[in-house]
Amino acid sequence: MQGLVVPSRSFVTRSASYCPAQPRPAAASLLARRCGTPLHTPAGGQTPRSGVRAMSILQNIMKGFSSGSSKASEQGARPAATLSFSDNAPSWEQLADLVRAKHSEFGVDFWADPNEGPTHPLALKRLFGSTEPVRVKLYRDHAAWCPYCHKVWLQLEEKRIPYVIEKINMRCYGDKPPSFTAKVPSGLLPVIELDGRVVTESAVIMGLLEDTFPDHKPLMPPAGTTARQRADLLMRLERKLFSDWLNWLCSDWNHERAKQQFEATMDLVASEMEREGGPYFLGSDISLVDITFCPMLERIAASLSYYKGSYIRGQGRWPAVDRWFVAMESRPTYLGTRSDFYTHAHDLPPQLGGCAMHADGEPVAAAIDGTDGTAWRLPLPPLSATSLPEPYSPGENPPVDRLEAAARLVRNHEAVVKFALRGPGRPGPRPVMAPLADPTALPALEHSREADAALRHVAHALLVGVEAKQVSTEALQTSPSAGLSGAAVVSAAEYLRDRVGVPRDMRYPAARQLRAHLNWLIDNLRGASV
């Protein structure tokens, strides 16, 4: 999902990714066996029914998101004309001053160096106060969505091992740089360099980091102990959970049987979470077992709600799993790497070759996508450990969440305007598999003034609140003809809205505020009641 990547000063990088890294070789064969791939037809030319369904879903996503404006109107056919609007929002310089004032008011700083402080997706050098030479270099995906990169990233953060980061393209949206493939011909991620030695495969990397840095918060019990034997068995359980998840997610054959098998494995996972008293697998503190399960449980929670209408957390079916998610979401290390349901719902199909939608998932998918007419519109409902469509136990702080979104937008406004104008622009000459990624798209720069003015209105609304803005002299005013044309702006705002990535661009609470405020702009320009 290409979009609002924010490395230091630019909101959009040269190569934001939409899909996770390619799976490990063993997993790749499992994915191919269970899910197929949209580019492969079995011998004899017949595609299994589940493969047809998966392909049709992926194709429908691509049709809906990859051309011009990103989504069909939630209210039906789009009106033939849009309104014009006033160019009276504060300047970017004035908005920057307002961001600084809000930083001071709330005691936060969303413009602070991401290399310092809590885990941050934009960090490129993490020293944790050390002055020793950095021994580890991590190669991970740009968008922070690869589950295998996620494990290694989280382990490094928990152990506080100093490391540097280089971000690499995903195959589904672009080529990998020759400098990387010269070191890793397979192109697979994650990769580390430890004292100059190139190491691949997440499980190998994680074991090596434990052995090489024993003084940095050991995350596994000592070898030869009963606790270590149990931890090793739990790692095998994670692979079974992975298999049963994909068997259900990627096929519409034997829906009930696949569901029952997955739920039986989840029963076992929940039981193991409770065995040592919880909330983590090995007891009261996080371990490498939790770090290994974490990326998959996060993606399971997102994808099964979206495609099957089934929640593994927040609904009381597995209380131990609920407590585990709450414990994980209390850790800044995890919150800095955590994605959201929308991001995963659309980054998984390119990786898996498609996901099979069940009728039970369709209303949940509409809410996660914001196409139900309410989920991505103001006022937003509160977030909690049981909130729907997405549970989020840390809750929310709407003024601070809006400030985070505004700070990202204001700091990187030039890149954001140009990126958003891909919406009314033209598709790129080099198409890619990922539906929401088009790195070579040609923006409609002739509409820069309109898009710039519109996004200043959005930033201002985020900073002061829509109600306060609309009774001020800087209110967004619309009319049938006077002012700037809103036609291209609607396409630009939709394009931008649908490409806000978590955690790459901002945390989930801030992302939903930005999406909702972009809808506020869109609805005003369409003449809808807001």
Image: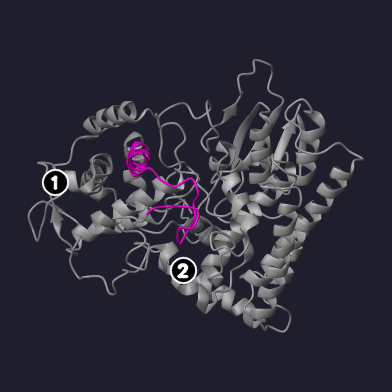
Q: Nearer the viewer, residue 134 or 384?
A: 384
Kind of residue indicated by mark 1: Ala
Classify mark 2: helix, strand or loop. helix
Q: Nearer the viewer, residue 224 or 441?
A: 224
Magenta segment's dominant SS is loop
What mark, if any, has residue 364 been given in the picture? 2
Classify mark 1: helix, strand or loop. loop
Residue 6's quadrant in the figure? top left
- The residue lying at 37 percent from left, 27 percent from top is 107
The span shown in magenta is 382-407
Residue 298's quadrant in the figure? bottom right
Of pointers 1 and 2, the one earlier in the residue sequence: 2
On whether residue 388 falls in the magenta region, the answer is yes
- Residue 400 x %, y %: 36, 38
How far apart are the alpha carbons under marks 1 and 2? 34 Å
Q: Is residue 203 left or right of residue 114?
A: right
